[in-house]
Image (spheres, rainbow, N blue to C red):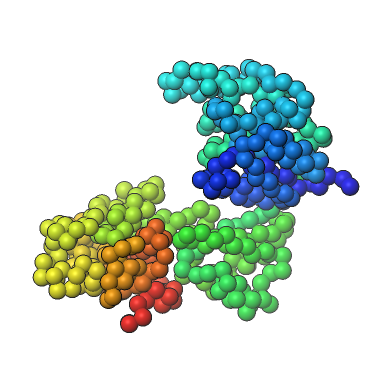
Amino acid sequence: MGKRAQVGLLLTGNELMSGDTVDSNSSRIALALSEKKIGIAKKITVGDEPQLLAESLRNLCSESHTVVINGGLGPTEDDLTAAVVAEVLGCTLVEHPGAIAHLAHWCERRGLELNASNLKQAYLPEGADLVANPLGSAVGFAVEIEGALVIATPGVPVELTAMLPEICERITARVGGGTAFIRRLQTFGIGESTIQELVNACSEEWPSQVTLGFRSGLPQLELKLQVDDDVFLEQRAEAERLLHRLIGDHIIGEDNDQLALSLQRALVTKNMSVTTAESCTGGLIASLITREPGSSKVFGSGFITYANTSKNKILDVPKATLVKHGAVSEPVVLAMLLGALKYGASDIGIAVSGVAGPGGGSDDKPVGTVWMAWGTRDQHRAVRLQIPGSRDRFQILVAAIGLDLMRRQLLELPPIPHYIQRFVHRSE
């Protein structure tokens, strides 16, 4: 049986086996290769065990035209990839002049001394070809094993990402491939099953040449529209228009757009500014807004008023309101919002106060309860939600919902989206 054109993937490291590190690199590699119409045929994860690594590498090389090894190129004793590859090849590790030059330049830029630990990364299997690493100290390398192209890559995600264009070029030169014409749309507040049902109901309108894919995340869902030839680009555009008709108010952008960027664009269009008043999210909403380039055009200030005294002194929330209704209440978040708009001198804002957990809940305000108020001085709303799950999940979803509610008001979309009903407190 001939070797398959798909790629074999070998992930290395005890931290992957123990769960201390979550594997995201295989997804990065697979997504990059999928755009070249190349798939991953087999993925093996092995700890820092030389014999198992060597055995796994031999097996993958016997089955695949190309094998990508990820991890094990660093300066420590448990970084074994170069030594294992040399063993499988039956050669020795030698000091590679290109790797030495890379390390020297890397250390010089950082004002570091090129020490013995770093020099370990310059010893590669004899005859190895370098794969450039624009960011890190460990270069990648490529060799031939049993007729298979083997490419070794570092395990640091940001370094791998920077190397992927060259890696994909080498693999496509070896096994062929093509171009997948992909359009990515970012959505919020709607699930993949709901979208699929809506598309199925309009199946006669959906172009058969277009494949719809999903990539779930928190808090967003990515849609992928793919055609395999540029002659079908109009069909892909037709499918996108259909999605906008079906779920347009949930589509927040394209490629890697985030909710905060979508909000920023709406603010710029309206020539408006935004402020935040946060308790249970501790500044996360403001952080997400300012994480986007260009945020200085729309964001002037935010307020983290975690304690009741801060709510009173900074945002003018009346003490009597806090005593009567408690911090997690409609009157308090409305007062927080109006205070933030006043002192932040902004046009629109969001205020949140809740019980993030895992403790601190009560019968009438259990863990996961949040009140949020949003809008302008003259047009604002408040809603109580119940968001189950961990503290992190609670804060992420509260922040995302807050960003989306402001986006919707600015774009004059339905102000209370259907997804809110999933979180509305049962007593309402």
Q: Where does residue 341 sit, x and y in percent of width and height?
A: 21, 61
The answer to whether 88 appears left or right of 340 in the picture is right
Q: Quadrant of the C terminus?
A: bottom left
Residue at 59% across, 45% down: 17
Considering depth in this image, is 205 or 124 the residue closer to the camera?
124
The answer to whether 128 appears left or right of 20 in the picture is right
Q: Where does residue 360 sit, x and y in percent of width and height?
A: 28, 65
Q: Where does residue 389 sit, x and y in percent of width and height?
A: 42, 65
**Label total for image:** 0
Residue at 69% across, 69% down: 207
Residue at 38% across, 65% down: 401
For residue 409, say whether it is visible: no
Q: Quadrant of residue 381?
A: bottom left
Considering depth in this image, is 200 or 296 the residue closer to the camera?
200
Taking 253 as reference, is 363 above or below it? below
Q: Residue furthest bottom?
A: 427
Q: Quadrant of residue 184?
A: bottom right
For residue 16, say whether it is visible: yes
Q: Residue furthest right?
A: 1
Considering depth in this image, is 220 or 367 the residue closer to the camera?
367
Considering depth in this image, is 56 or 41 the residue closer to the camera?
56
Taking 281 as reference, is 177 above or below it? above
Q: Where does residue 56 sit, x and y in percent of width and height?
A: 73, 40
Residue at 46% across, 17% down: 113
Q: Quadrant of residue 130?
A: top right
